[in-house]
Amino acid sequence: MSLTNYAELISAVERWIKRADLNSQIPDFISITENKLSRVLRTAQQQTQVIANAAFPIAIPGDLQDVIALSVLVGARYKSLEYLPGNKVNNSKGTAFGYSVLNNKFILEPASENAIDYKLDYYAKIPALNEINTTNWLLTKYPGVYLYGALIQASLYMVDDERIGVWKAQFEEEVNLINLDNNALAARGSLAVRAR
């Protein structure tokens, strides 16, 4: 069984569920799996960095899943900003010390009208598979997580309680393997942030 691209993944799910009448739902099962994985995984491959100069507020990147750090250049060094809930932003004066999110944009506290050098480190969502984007790092390295995740979704759709436990155990084992591999990378100091 080869699972190196989107079409092969769809074919594998078709074979495993043995239900030709569900072929049109399989892309949904895969998409739901990707969304779940984006919420639960935090891996080196998801780490992304944007370094830019812009006036705030700035739009949140479309692939952002979770912020690691937002920093602004102060002198020759980047200073990490503290996240502030929206009710803590009061537009004080001085050097930026915090940020918040308003209308799907990052805002600074205090606000600045000038362009600022900033660095945003974040975890990106898993790149979605489809007919155009036929593979990604996760399918290449861990095809089983996609297969078992899609099978869980198919079992839920079919109300097939007998097999869902098997697929769920395999899915969780795959997620644990991903986390173990990522922890090993971190221990070796091999985590690298992907610049955009």
Image (tube, rainbow, N blue to C red):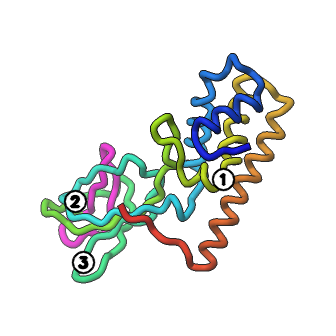
* Disc 1: which residue: 142
Magenta-colored stretch includes residue 101: yes
* Label whose residue precedes the other's in the sequence (2 or 1): 2
Q: Is residue 140 above or below residue 47?
A: above
How many neighbours does mark 1 have within 10 angstroms: few (below 14), some (14-19), or many (20 or more)? some
Q: Is residue 35 left or right of residue 105?
A: right
Farthest residue toward the bottom?
Answer: 76
* Disc 2: which residue: 91
**Spot occupied by residue 78 in the image (x, y as percentages of width and height):** 31, 76
Q: Nearer the viewer, mark 2 or mark 3?
A: 3
Q: Is residue 78 above or below residue 84?
A: below
Q: Nearer the viewer, mark 1 or mark 3?
A: 1
Asked which quadrant contains residue 84, the reply is bottom left
**Spot occupied by residue 58 in the image (x, y as percentages of width and height):** 26, 53
The residue under the point 77% across, 25% down is 18
* Label whose residue precedes the other's in the sequence (2 or 3): 3
Q: CA distance from mark 2 to mark 3?
A: 19 Å
At label 1, which amino acid type do we have?
A: Tyr
* Disc 3: which residue: 74
Q: Secondary structure at mark 3?
A: strand
At label 2, which amino acid type do we have?
A: Asn
Q: Which residues are magenta?
A: 92-109
Q: Nearer the viewer, residue 126 or 140?
A: 140
Q: Nearer the viewer, residue 130 or 84?
A: 130
Quarter the N terminus occupies: top right
Magenta-colored stretch includes residue 177: no
**Spot occupied by residue 166 in the image (x, y as percentages of width and height):** 83, 40
Q: Secondary structure at mark 1?
A: loop
* Label whose residue precedes the other's in the sequence (1 or 3): 3
Farthest residue toward the front?
Answer: 2
